[in-house]
Amino acid sequence: MALGLDVTDIGWDIIRIDGTAEHVPGFPAADQVPEYVMKYTERIGALFGTASRFASQFPEALVITPHRLHA
């Protein structure tokens, strides 16, 4: 899989990560992981309003193992 990260609205560069994505059944919802909520509070709030709304729209966890970074 290839993941493109684009946050140019806040002045960052666009990068691409090649890697493997793995579904993690039974992983806690995003709004139940305090570290995740703290790290992404601003973006979640701007795009989804609340962490629980984000978690309901994206209920499944993926773990991405990077193999190559294109920056």
Image (spheres, rainbow, N blue to C red):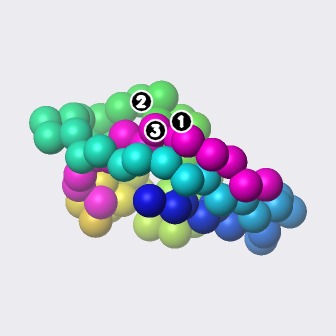
Crowding at label 3, few (<14), some or many (≥20) Cα neighbours within 10 Å? few
Crowding at label 1, few (<14), some or many (≥20) Cα neighbours within 10 Å? few
Depth check, mark 3 against mark 2: the one in front is: 3
Q: Which residue is mark 1?
A: 38
Q: Secondary structure at mark 1?
A: helix
Q: Which residues are magenta?
A: 58-71
Does the image show residue 41?
no
Gap between marks 1 and 2, in whole Å?
6 Å
Gap between marks 3 and 1, in whole Å?
22 Å
Q: Which residue is mark 2?
A: 34
Does the image show residue 55?
yes
Q: Is residue 68 magenta?
A: yes
The C terminus is located in which quarter? bottom right
The structure residue drawn at horizontal position 36% and vertical position 32%, both measured from the top left corner, is: 33
Q: Amino acid at mark 2?
A: Pro
Q: Amino acid at mark 3?
A: Thr
Give the main secondary structure of the magenta stretch. Answer: strand
Q: Which of the numbered marks, if any, corresponds to residue 65?
A: 3
- Residue 4 screen position, x and y as percent: 60, 64
The tag earlier along the polypeptide, 3 or 2, is 2
Are the two marked residues, 1 and 2, in contact with CB atoms closer than 8 angstroms? yes
Reply above or below: 11 against 17: below
The structure residue drawn at horizontal position 42% and vertical position 29%, both measured from the top left corner, is: 34
Q: Residue furthest front?
A: 67
